[in-house]
Image (cartoon, grey):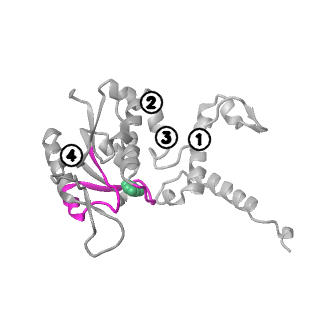
Amino acid sequence: MPENSFQFDILTLFPGLFDGLRNESLLGKALASDVLGLHTHNWRQWTTDRHNTVDDLPFGGGPGMVLKPEPILSCLRELTPQRAAKTPVVLLSPAGRLFRQELAQEWAQGPGLILLCGRYEGFDARIEQHVDHVVSIGDYVLNGGEVAAMAIIEAVARLLPGVIGNAASLTEESHSSGLLEHPHYTRPREFEGEPVPEVLLGGNHAEIDRWRRRQSLLRTKLRRPELMQGLVIDKKDRTWLDAEWAALQAAAAPASDDRD
Ligand code: ADE
């Protein structure tokens, strides 16, 4: 394993799901160039009974099956001594704390990540004592942790030096500043009657920066108002935002003579 490379270890019952990630896109290139390592471990191989049982009925009753603690823990115990001591162990679960960009940035400092992907009703709760984080990628339930692990792998890997060519695109994108990113436009200058905003065509970079900052504020207030809490906004930007907001509200409200 080359030094300075970032190692992802994924404990999963469905390792084949990660083949696409391995072979495609920038991530595939990074894997080929040794910036990254991606290793899957099917913990069914750590079962000791002849049926290779990974799950069992829940104590207390209820639907579905629960993942037994022994094989996953055996797998984890065999793996951890092979990894750097600081490598976080992360269990994916819809009952976890929300995964956000700050966590991706923290984890991208290295040396790697160990990701535990659940299935069925999830893991026996006693596994949680052996992990550093229980993380969810959003308030919805997937069939298992694999897609969540892939989201985390992509979010972390693209922050590593050498994975994405243009470092500026990392600092300007949504969530890196706590706001949603401003809109982007490319050619044609007019598309189905919609022109590109004039300011982007003029080459005045101070004006373009201001327009982008304000569009970020407006987008965030519209789509993710909870992200605006505690945000310090320049006075002129605040005045612009309040006026724009009032105009949008007025446009959305039905005119009084539309009502019967
Ligand atoms: N497993 C199932 N749903 C999940 C979610 N939303 N996040 C992380 N892991 C999951």
Q: What is the three-letter code of the residue carrying label 1?
A: Arg
Tell me which residue sits at (45%, 60%) in the image.
139
* Element carrying mark 1: helix
- The answer to which of marks 4 and 1 sits earlier in the sequence is 4
Badge 2 marks a residue whose secondary structure is helix
Is tag 4's residue or tag 2's residue first in the polypeptide sequence? Answer: 2
Label 4 and label 3: CA atoms lie apart by: 41 Å
Image coordinates of residue 189 in percent, x first then y, are 72, 31
Number of the label disc, if any, that sits on residue 46: none
Q: Is residue 193 left or right of residue 38?
A: right
C-alpha separation, residue under disc 1 versus residue under disc 2: 29 Å
Q: Specify whether residue 217 is in view.
A: yes
Q: Is any part of residue 162 visible from this angle? A: no
Q: Is residue 75 left or right of residue 190?
A: left
- What's under tag 3, amino acid-wise? Glu
Q: In this figure, which residue is indicated by the disc labeled 2?
A: 25
Pointer 4 local density, CA inside 10 Å: few below 14, some 14–19, many at least 20: some
Residue 84 in the magenta stretch? The answer is no
Please report contact status of discs 4 and 2: CB closer than 8 Å, yes or no.
no
Query: Which amino acid type is shown beneath numbered disc 2?
Result: Ser
Q: In front of the other: label 2 or label 3? A: 2
Q: Mark 4 points at which residue?
A: 45
Tag 4–tag 1 contact (CB < 8 Å):
no
Picture quarter with the N terminus: top left
Q: Nearer the viewer, mark 1 or mark 2?
A: 2
Among the two numbered marks 1 and 2 on one chain, the one whose residue lies closer to the N terminus: 2
Write the start and end of the magenta stretch as one range.
114-143
Q: Residue at label 3? A: 173
Name the spot of residue 23 as percent of width and height, x first.
40, 30
Residue closest to the eye, 31 or 238: 31
